Amino acid sequence: MVTHDSGAQDFPDRRNNRFAAAIFRTDHKTIGLRYLWLALFSVFVGVTASLIMRLEVVWPVAHLSLFSHFGPVPDRYAVLTLLHGSLMVFMVLTTAPQAGFATYLLPSQIGARDVAFPKLSALAFWATAFSFLGMVAAFFLTPAAGITVWMASVAVFCAAGLLVAVNLGVTVIDLRAKGMTLPRLPITVWAWCVNAILGMLIFSSLLAVCVCLLADRFLGTQIFGSWAFPAQLSTYSQADTFIPEWQRLFWFFTQAQVYVAMIPCFGLVTHVLATLARRPVWMYRPVVLAICGFGVLGFCIWGEHLFVNGLNPSASLTFSRLAAALGFPAIIFVVSWFGTLWGGQARATTSMLFTLGFISLFLSGGLSGLILARHDLQSTSARGDFVAGHFHLVMGVAAAFAMLAGLFFWFPKMFGRPLDERLGKLHFWLTFAGVYCVFMPMHWMGLIAYTSVTSQDPAMTLATESFLGTFVTVAILFTTAAQTFFVANFVRSLRRSAQPAEPNPWRATTLEWACQSPVAQEGLVSRETVVYRGAYEFGAEDCGGVAAADFFPQHVPLDVAGITAPHRESRVNGESAPPSSQPAGAG
């Protein structure tokens, strides 16, 4: 173990200036925590915007002085929708699982001291924070100025996302510890690496679009035509609303963005599930291929939503087949999750509950996705209730459950103290019930026009929609109120009211638990660290009858772990066993 304080070493002339040290720290643990704090703050702002949106729906005649300069209700609602969607998609679903968890954990999980480019990591964070301020500030400006500020903020965010993607990709490729071969990587590292490659492709595309739009605005280039920033934002010609170049570039990013948000969540859930179930990841290599499949197919189906844009019919068929092929990697994940649980010794911790909740939401949202594939449901998206319920259930709430599972799992590593399990379980059950009460009725509201009873009785349809709308509003308030238990739990642990956590409370095998906790300024794994086995080695059946722990850390030599024959890894990861039962340098 060696001590490393990157903030002091990188800027020795600011050692006595705490404020400057806080600003210029570059170690991956500090930057990762800052990303998570930013995402957590964005959640509260985004949820507040969604509550105000719900108020606009159930009480459209309300006069809110804060929004009076936006004009009539539809304009205020559109601005709130833009603010809510921007913060949740960019600052939460993209920032937290990739930039936050990956920046904090990925170097430690592969045995690296830091990310490949620490200063670029710090620059990317401050650019992301600046982008957050711009998106929120755009909400308080007039529409003409606000859309320009928002567009510039998105461009800054894309540039920061590119820096994060390049940094993480190079870190995985070049900085792995000795013996950390690809089959020995944790599933989380695979997910973050594939996601980094996908992010480099799509964020560069959206960055180019934003630059072109700003050039149209300030330089009059008209790359996308005169519609990009007209004098009156509400006036568009029929031809301007269907420009193929703009729509293709938009969906090139947007369709793949779903998988940028979800691929890290698949990795987090699979890793937590295997560790807490005390079982190796079932079908490890097919799961890795499924992650790669999500990355490749998610990048290639950008034309799925352009069937009304004059594409060649053969192209539309190709995109639809590629989209349908996404079911294969999804099935692999589901089978692997259940196979990992089968015969395992699962611990009913809060992290495990949120993991199982993610699986439940993913399956429910997948079924509604099959319904959306029907061609005769095009009119369902007129109000968007069904689409909104499906989208939030899969990409929003399911991803939030995955991030909460990861937060409860790695909180002792980050802060040295665990979150309270009783408060955590209460928070889970209230939230789990609440989100189903919110989004399942939204599915019903989207399909209500197709029922044989209400379609023949408009009065019954109106009464049913009014009842469901009120029910959803009450459920939203209930679910939002349930988050106070998480806040109380979080604050209680940060105020050091909780007992210090054990060094490895979950008996995990990966390298991040080889360091002391918390890890703000901790002894890192040394450069001489050697990895001897895969990431998910559980069970004592290979110990030759010797009483031992039920897990084998990756960095512990075989003789220290009490393993007499190194055949376990060949069974788990499909590798050939090493020629000797004791690796060179062990003992």
Image: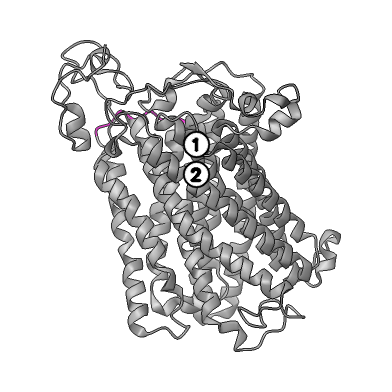
Q: Image height check: is 512 above or below 124?
A: above
Label 1 residue SS: loop
Label 2: how many Cα within 10 Å (few below 14, some 14–19, many 20+):
many
Please give left or right for residue 383 compared with residue 323 in the image: right
Q: Mark 2 points at which residue?
A: 167
Going 43% across and 80% down the picture, which residue do you hit?
307
Front-lying residue, 78 or 479: 78
Q: Image height check: is 442 above or below 558?
A: below
Residue 444: mark in rendering: none
Please give left or right for residue 51 compared with residue 406 in the image: right
Residue lying farthest to the bottom in this orientation = 238
Q: What stretch is highlighted in magenta?
A: 343-349
Q: Name the residue under label 1.
A: 115
Does the rendering let one see residue 394? no
Going 56% across and 74% down the picture, which residue do you hit?
461
Q: Distance between the residues labelled 2 and 1?
A: 7 Å
Q: Do the residues labelled 2 and 1 touch (CB within 8 Å)?
A: yes
Front-lying residue, 306 or 576: 576
Q: Where is residue 481 in the image (x, y as percent from the top left)?
A: 65, 43
Q: Which of marks 2 and 1 is nearer the N terminus?
A: 1
Q: Is residue 347 magenta?
A: yes
Q: Image height check: is 62 above or below 478?
A: below
Does the rendering let one see residue 99? yes
Going 70% across and 35% down the picture, which residue do you hit?
23
